[in-house]
Amino acid sequence: MGARRRRVLVALALGVLGAAIVLAGCGGGSSSGSGTLIVLGASSLTEAVTKYGESFEGAEVKPSFAGSDELAAQIKQGAKAEVFASADTEYPQELFAEGLVEKPAVFARNELVIAVPEGSDITSLADLAKPGTKIVIGDPSVPVGSYTRTVLERLPGSEREAIMSNVVSEETEVSSIVAKLEQGAADAGFVYVTDEKGADGLEPVELESKLQPDVEYGVAVVKSSGDRAAAEEFVAGLIEGEGQEDLREAGFLPPP
């Protein structure tokens, strides 16, 4: 959490703007009165949570996707929301400790992969250490960046340093990493398997199992929710209902 906490002021600043946007979107009223369920989700959940929300019958779901750190900052700033779905378990636990969300639960798992353009000469992790290779990774404040550093920390020091010296950008959302790869602005990037599968013109370079981090997604009901019953129903569906089916279809692994 050290690197994350060094960036908490930036995340909180972004959260102020995000909170204003969310509040504007719901008119500042309670979701119980409008039948609206605002779900703040990590950007890697965009496909699965959007699909689940469209079929959810408990309320009209309005998802908002961004980096997990920015979404947590929005909640701290008082943004109207019913559910928080993060790409890790640390941010939900942090908000729980601060009394802002109910007890979190793990609802999905994922894996990290190196995404490269189709036909790339990069076929292994070792290739990332070659001079001149342009790599994009996640900022340490977001889960994908933290997971990436877990992988790199398991490498010999010289190899880790060579790879980090080739990093040309650190993004605050996994979707931004994918975008740079699709645009040809980078040769390789660390992303989730689910994001690589949904990208155009990219292919995966798998990591050895001994390097693979434990990628777990946490979800919680926001305590200030205006529709607690619908929020709890939505979360239950993510864990073991229709939402779980949509997650599996998008390539996520079941919770432990």
Image (spheres, grey):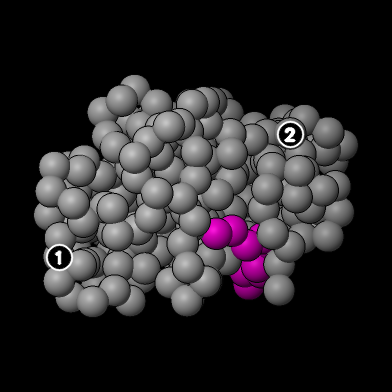
Segment tinted magenta in the rendering: 103-111
Nearest to the observer: residue 25 or residue 10 = 10
- Disc ID at residue 161: 1
Q: Real-space Cα distance between discs 1 and 2?
A: 40 Å
Report x, y in % for residue 171.
29, 43
Residue at the spot of label 2: 51
Q: Earlier in the sequence, mark 1 or mark 2?
A: 2
Q: Main secondary structure of the magenta part?
A: strand
Q: SS for tag 1? A: helix
Tell me which residue sits at (36%, 68%) in the image.
151
Q: Is residue 107 magenta?
A: yes
Tell me which residue sits at (21%, 56%) in the image.
129
Q: Is residue 2 magenta?
A: no
* Quadrant of residue 175 within the rendered picture: top left
Report x, y in % for residue 48.
68, 40
The quarter of the picture where the C terminus appears is bottom right
Q: Relative to residue 224, is residue 171 depicted above or below?
A: above
Asked whether the residues under the numbered discs 1 and 2 touch, taking CB atoms below 8 Å apart as contact, a structural biologist would say: no
Determine crowd level at label 2: few under 14, some 14-19, many 20+ residues with C-alpha closer than 10 A.
some
Report x, y in % for residue 241.
86, 54
Residue type at mark 2?
Answer: Lys
Tell me which residue sits at (46%, 62%) in the image.
207
Q: Relative to residue 15, is residue 233 depicted above or below?
A: below
Residue 144 seen in this snapshot: yes
Nearest to the observer: residue 88 or residue 119 = 119
Q: SS for tag 2? A: helix
